Image: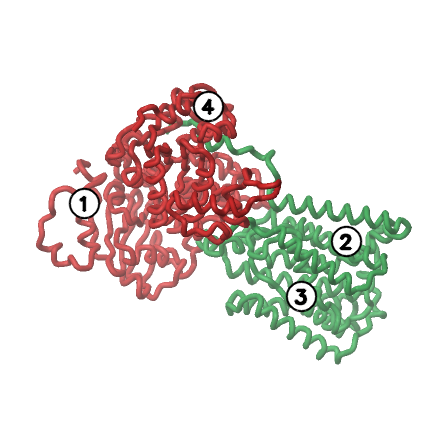
Chain colours: A green, B red
Amino acid sequence: MSTSVPPSHARHLGPLAIPSGVQLQEYTLAGVILVLVAVGAALKPDTFPTADNLRAVVTQASVVGVLAIGMTFVIATAGIDLSVGSVVAAAGVAGGLLVDNGSLAFILGAIGFGLLLGLVNATSIAYGRVIPFIATLAMFAIARGLALQMSGKSPISLLGSDGVRWFGTGKILTVPVSVVVFLAITIGGWILLNRTRYGRHVVAVGGNREAARIAGVPVRRIIFSVYCMTGLLAGVAAVLLCGRLASASPVSGQLLELDAIGATVIGGTSLSGGKATIVGTFLGVMVFAVIFNLLTQLNLATEWQQIVKGVIILAAVLIQRPGRD
Amino acid sequence: MDDTPILQVSGLVKDYPGVRALGGVDFDVLPGEVHCIVGPNGAGKSTLIKCIAGVIQPTSGEIRIDGELVSADPSAALAQGVATIYQERDLVEDLSVSQNIFLGHELRRWGLLDRARMRRATTELLRRVNHEGISPDILVRDLRPAGQQIVSIARALSQHVRLLIMDEPSAILDDTEIETMFDVMRRLAADGVGVVYISHRLDEIRRIGDRVTVLTEGATVASGLPASTPADELVRLMVGQELSDLVPDRAVGGGELLLEVKGITRLPDVKNVSFELRAGEVLGIAGLVGAGRSELLRAVYGVDDRDAGEVLVDGNRLPPNRPDRAIAAGLGLAPEDRKSQALLLGWSLTKNVTLADIGRFQRIVLRVRAERAAAEEQLRALQTKPDDSERPAQELSGGNQQKVVLARWLLRRSRILLLDEPTRGVDVSAKAELYRIITELAAQGFGVVVVSSEIEELCGLCTRILVMREGELVADLEGSQATELDVLRHAMPSTQEMVATSTPPTGGRGPTDGEET
C-alpha cells in the first residue's frame, strides 16, 4: 500500500478549526450571561452586581440545577422525565413525615422516596417498554397525588429542624450550602458523563441504540439507571427546597420539570439523544437564574418572566436545529 | 465536429504541504464530448476539478480553455465558460428556481429586479435542458434531488458555458433520476458543450461517456480511452492489478474449534441451522436476499431472540439475547448497515473504536489519552484514512468506516468476527484492502464469518461457503472448488432438481477463475 496521504486530507484544518457545536453553544451561553450581568449592573448598579445578590442568584438556581443535571443524563439517552417537579414535592412530604425522628431521617426519607418513584419510572420505561414521555407523565400525576394525600393537603413545617434548614440557609465558608451541593453534583455529573464508561454508554444509547447494543452496551440497564438518577436527584432537590422554605409543601415544585428541561436544552443537549453537555446545562441554569433575578429587580411581573423564559427556550432550540435533513 | 479541444490539461501538479494531491494529470475534452474521469476515493478527482474551475492554484502544469491559459480565479474561469456542479448542491433551498438561477447576476430594470424577464429566461433555460415542467416560481426545497440537479445545470447555462464539470452527481440520485440527468447531458453535448463527468461508478461510463480517463493517486494512468473499455480493464488500471488478484491467498482454516451453532431457529427467517467455525477459517454464508443470512448472524450473536438452538463458544453455551455476553466470549459483529447499526456517526473515530471496550481505560476516571492512543494504534494497523482519530465517523468513506468497526473488535481482542456484507458500498480498492485484512486476520488465528451478496467475493475469499435458502442451510461447499454457478444453483429455490442432474456449464466470472485447485 502507498503511504501517501489522500488529498482529501488536505481539506482538514485540524483542531484549530471552528469549535464544534457543543463548544460553540457553551461560549454563546457564557457570553449571554456576561451580557445579562453587564445589563444588570448598568440598570441596577446598587443592587444587582453585589456579592449578596449574585450569591442569591446561584442559591435560587441550585434546586433547578440539581434537577437539570439528572435531566441531562435522561435526555442524553433520548428520553425525558416530566415527573421531577411532582417527585420533588412528594419526596419533601415523605421526608417531612419523618422529620420528628431527626433531620437525617428527613434527608434519607426524601432522597429514598425520590429514588423509589424514580425506580417506578425506570422499571416501566426500561423493562415495561412504556415510552418515557407517557411513563413520566403518569408519574407527574401520581407523585403530586401522593404528596397531597400523604400531607393531608397542607404543608408540613420544618421550622423545628435546624438540620434541614441548614441546607437552605447555612453556609460553608461564605458559600451557601445549597450552592455547594449544586456545584458538587455538577462536577460529579461532568466526571460521570465525560470521564467514565457509564457516561460513554449513556450517550451511546441515546446516539444509536442499536449500535450501542451490538457493541455490548447494556442498554436497558443504562436506561433504567438514568431514571433512578433523576428520582434520586429530585430527592436531593427536595431537601434543598424544603430547607429554604422551612416547610414541605405538597404544592411545591410545580413546573420545575420544565425549567430543568429548558435549561438542559438551551445548554445544547440534544433532545434526540447522543449529544450531552453538563457545562451547557450548568450555563443554561445560570442564564435562567440571572434573567429571573434581573426581571425581579426591574419589578417586572412574573408573567413577563414566563414569557421571556419561553422565548429563550424557543430561540435556543431554533438555533440548535440542524441546517439540513 | 471541431477538433480543437475545449479543455486541455497537461502536466498538472498540485502540492499541499507534505502531500502531493496531483502528480501529473493529462487529458483533454473535445467539443460535444462527455469525458468521464474515474478513480478510487482519494485519487484527486476533487482537487483536479477545483484546479480547472480556478478555485485553487496548481503548483505546476497548464490548463487551457479553447487554447487560452486559465488563471486561478473562479470568476475568470466562469467568464471563459467553465461551469462546475459540485457534489454538494449549492442552491438556496428557500429561494425559488428562478431566484436561484439568477442569484448573483439578477436581471434588473430601473434598478429594480426584473422578475418577469428572469422568469421568462428561466423557462427558456429549463426548456433547453428539457425540463420546462419545472415552474420558475417553485421553491428549490420542494424539488426532488434530481430536480435540484437540473436547476444547478440550468444555472450553469444561464451564463455562457463551454465546459460543464459535474462532480459525482449520481451519488445522490436514484436510477430514473440519473437517466434524466444523462438526457440533459446528452442534449448539452449535442449543442457542442464539453462535459467532464466525475464518477466512481464504472457502469455509468458506457451509458453516458465518449471517452474515459483513469486517475489514481493523483496521476492519470490512462487518458482518453474509449468509453467501451471493459470494466475489468478499468479496475486493473485503478488498482494496478486484476480483479482476481484482489483476493490474497485463501485462508486455509483447520485450527481449533471456536464456535458451534446447533439447530438455531428464529422463525420465519432461520430454520434449524447448524455449523462450526474453526480458527484460521473464513466461512462464507451465501444466499439470495431474504434467505435469512443476516438474521442468522444476529440470532447467533444475540441481537435478536431465537426460538430454538444453541450457540457454543469454546464449549460454553451463550445465553440468547445477550450481545454483551457474546462479546465477552470473544464474538464481534460488524452489522449489515454500518451507519444505523454499527457507528455513532457524530462521534469521533476514537470513541467509536473504544465503545465495546471502554471499561479497559477506566481506573477511577477514563484515561482519555490512553484511550485515544489505543484506538489510533488499531486504526493505523488497518491503514484507516484519515488517520486523525478525533474526526467524526460520518466523514469517512464506506471502506474506512468498516475499518473503524473492525478496529473496535480488534481492540476488544475478539476472536470470532461476524461480518455482515463487509464490502457493501465500498469502492474497488478498499474492497481489496478489506479482503487482505480478512485473510490476514484468519492467518493470525481469528475465525471469520462473512455474509455477502457478492458470490464471486465469497468464492475468492472463503475457506468454506455455506449456502442458505429460505432460512435453511442447503449446502456446505469447499471454497477453493466452489464457483459462482454452484453457489447460485443451491441458492435458487426453483433449481433444486437441476443441482442433481445438470453438468455445470463452462465459465463463471470472477476471482475463482484460474485459481488454485
Callout 2 crowding tier (Cα within 10 Å): few <14, some 14–19, many ≥20: some
- Whether tag 1 and tag 3 are in contact, CB under 8 A, the answer is no
As measured in the structure, the alpha-carbon distance from the residue carrying label 1 to the one carrying label 3 is: 64 Å
Camera-nearest residue between A39 and A174: A39
Callout 3 crowding tier (Cα within 10 Å): few <14, some 14–19, many ≥20: many
As measured in the structure, the alpha-carbon distance from the residue carrying label 4 to the one carrying label 3 is: 66 Å
Q: Chain of mark 4?
A: B
Say which residue label 1 marks.
B483
> Which amino acid lies under the numbered mark 4 shown in the image of this protein?
Val
Could you tell which of marks 2 and 3 lies nearer the N-terminus?
A: 3
Note whether A248 is above or below B496 in the view shown.
Answer: below
Of marks 2 and 3, the one in the foreground: 3
As measured in the structure, the alpha-carbon distance from the residue carrying label 1 to the one carrying label 2 is: 72 Å
> Which amino acid lies under the numbered mark 2 shown in the image of this protein?
Val
Q: Residue furthest right?
A: A46
Q: What residue do we see at 25% from left, 61% from top? A: B470
As measured in the structure, the alpha-carbon distance from the residue carrying label 2 to the one carrying label 3 is: 21 Å
Q: Work out which quarter of the rendered image holds the C terminus of chain B and state it.
A: top left
Could you tell which of marks 4 and 1 lies nearer the N-terminus?
A: 4
Residue A228 percent coordinates (x, y): 61, 63
- Whether tag 4 and tag 3 are in contact, CB under 8 A, the answer is no
Note whether A316 is above or below B426 in the view shown.
Answer: below
- On residue B70, the disc is 4
> Which amino acid lies under the numbered mark 3 shown in the image of this protein?
Val
Residue B49 percent coordinates (x, y): 43, 31
As measured in the structure, the alpha-carbon distance from the residue carrying label 2 to the one carrying label 4 is: 67 Å
Discs 4, 1: same chain: yes
Q: What residue do we see at 58% from left, 41% from top? A: B109
Q: Secondary structure at mark 1?
A: loop
Q: Secondary structure at mark 4?
A: loop
> Which amino acid lies under the numbered mark 1 shown in the image of this protein?
Thr
Say which residue label 3 marks.
A84
